[in-house]
Amino acid sequence: MKQIIAKKAPAAIGPYCHAIVHGDLAFCSGQIPLDPETMKIVGQTIEAQTVQVMKNIEAVLTEVGTTLNKIIKTTIFLKSMDDFSEMNKAYEACLKGHKPARSTVEVARLPRDAKIEIECIAVIE
């Protein structure tokens, strides 16, 4: 197993790395909509926050040598299922037609009071 700390992703805000690579798989820690430079939440809307989360995931995947279109599974944590439809639109736009397996759950609270967190598993080829 190899621990990954991505230079262009927001710094971890706890005792974890951005991803673990094992074989040809990258297991990515959850990303919230933090700006990597300011470490502040980006956006007030679920759409803006979803786009930032996907940018952060892309930074981690780039560090391990893969891309968003190699994601095989995501888990999405939403502060409110009322945001489901708008999140889906932004998420789908970021993935440009790629449709990984996915679970979406509503949670009571997320770090820094974010509206969304996404974790993923991706293939490295």
Image (cartoon, helix red, strand yellow):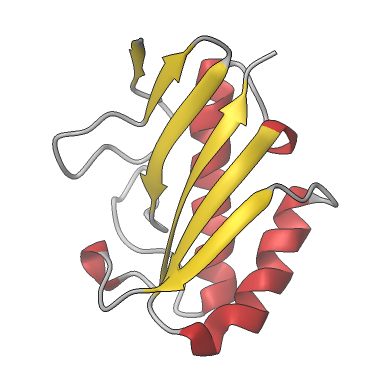
Q: In the displayed structure, does residue 7 sit left or right of residue 101? A: left
Label total for image: 0
The image shows residue 90 at horizontal and vertical percentages of 68, 67
Residue depicted at 52% across the width and 33% down the height = 59
Q: Which residue lies furthest to the left in this view?
A: 15
Q: Which of 91 and 20 is in front in this view?
A: 20
Q: Which residue is drawn at 33% across and 74% down?
A: 107
Residue at image position (54%, 35%) is 121
Q: Position of residue 30 (x, y in %)?
A: 38, 47
Residue at the far bottom: name it.
82
Q: Where is residue 102 in the image (x, y as percent from the top left)?
A: 61, 55
Query: Is 68 rendered above or below residue 4?
Result: below
- The foreground one among 87 and 34 is 87
Q: Quadrant of residue 85?
A: bottom right
Look at the picture and state if 82 lies above or below 91.
Answer: below
Q: Give the camera-side residue of 79 and 39.
A: 79
Q: Give the quarter of the figure containing the C terminus.
A: top right
Q: Residue at the spot x=24%, y=62% of the render?
A: 111
Dividing the picture into quarters, in which one does residue 14 lie? Answer: top left
| Residue that sits furthest to the right in the current view | 97
Height in image: 45 above or below 48? below
Q: Horizontal and vertical percent for residue 70?
A: 70, 31
Which quadrant of the rendered structure holds the N terminus? top left
